[in-house]
Amino acid sequence: MTAPEPPAEQPPAAPAPRKRGAWVGTITDKVPTGWLTGILLVPFLAITAAFGGLNAVAAPAIPEISPGDTHDSGPFDLTVERAVLIDELQGSGASPEEGQRVLALVVTAENTWDRAFGSYATNGVTGALAIPALGEGAAPVAVARLDDATGSPFLQPGMPVELIVTWVVDAGAYTDGDEIALEIRDFTLSVGQFITAGEDWGYPVLGATLAVPVTDVGAGADAEADG
């Protein structure tokens, strides 16, 4: 009986053809995520630059208004009417010392919110008005009603009121006829969630600028801000 012949040796199987694009998965599997993000970011930035960059949309210009113009600051409308310089202004809340004077703005404020709102606060009338040239003293020191000298009054909804907003300045800081560069800030209403609750105005941003001429009304505790 003849022994069976051993089976013929089979050639090795040919590797299965790789699908088009399979190398992409192989490479990305071996590339750290941070590197891959950077690789993809380069062509994105190149395309962005070709179309003017990430900051192609210009920020809106800050409006320049004039005395007598009304500006919407969020919870209230503000109208800066005039500015006066005086040695002392009783009932205004400002207390100048020797070598200082009172700089006062006559302002009409109208609460456009649905509840009473404080005038003296970082988000109130005093927080909305600033004189950058005064540096750290840019914010007013006091605010009072023009008609009855009530200090730090609350503004009632829909009721315009004339206010005296005051700063204490060095005696030689301003003279009659100078223009004061004033900034008005706007506020955004936020609604508290989770930890905080309720509504509040904050996030001040520059909303408008204006130049106000100042009138020196002289000295005396009984002088009036209306000149």
Image (cartoon, helix red, strand yellow):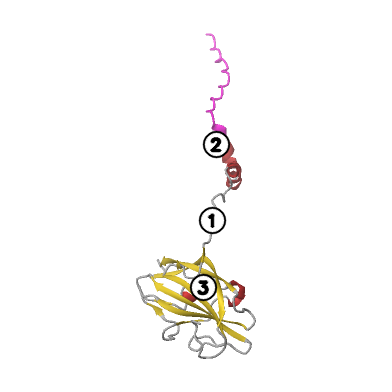
Label 2, on which residue?
25
**Toward the viewer: 161 or 128?**
161
Q: Is 87 positioned to the left or the right of 203 in the image?
A: right
For residue 1, which numbered disc appears in the image? none
Residue 36 is situated, as x and y percent measured from the top left of the image, at 59, 44
Element assignment for label 3 = strand
Q: Is residue 81 left or right of residue 46?
A: left
User: Which callout, 3 or 1, points at the residue further toward the start of the chain?
Assistant: 1
Question: Cβ–Cβ below 8 Å for labels 3 and 2?
Answer: no
Residue tagged 1: 59
Image vertical order of residue 158 relative to residue 46, above or below? below
Displayed quadrant of residue 27: top right
Q: What residue is at 54 percent from the left and 9 percent from the top?
A: 2
Residue picked out by circle 3: 129
* Residue span colored magenta: 1-25
User: Residue 69, image x and y in percent?
Assistant: 46, 68
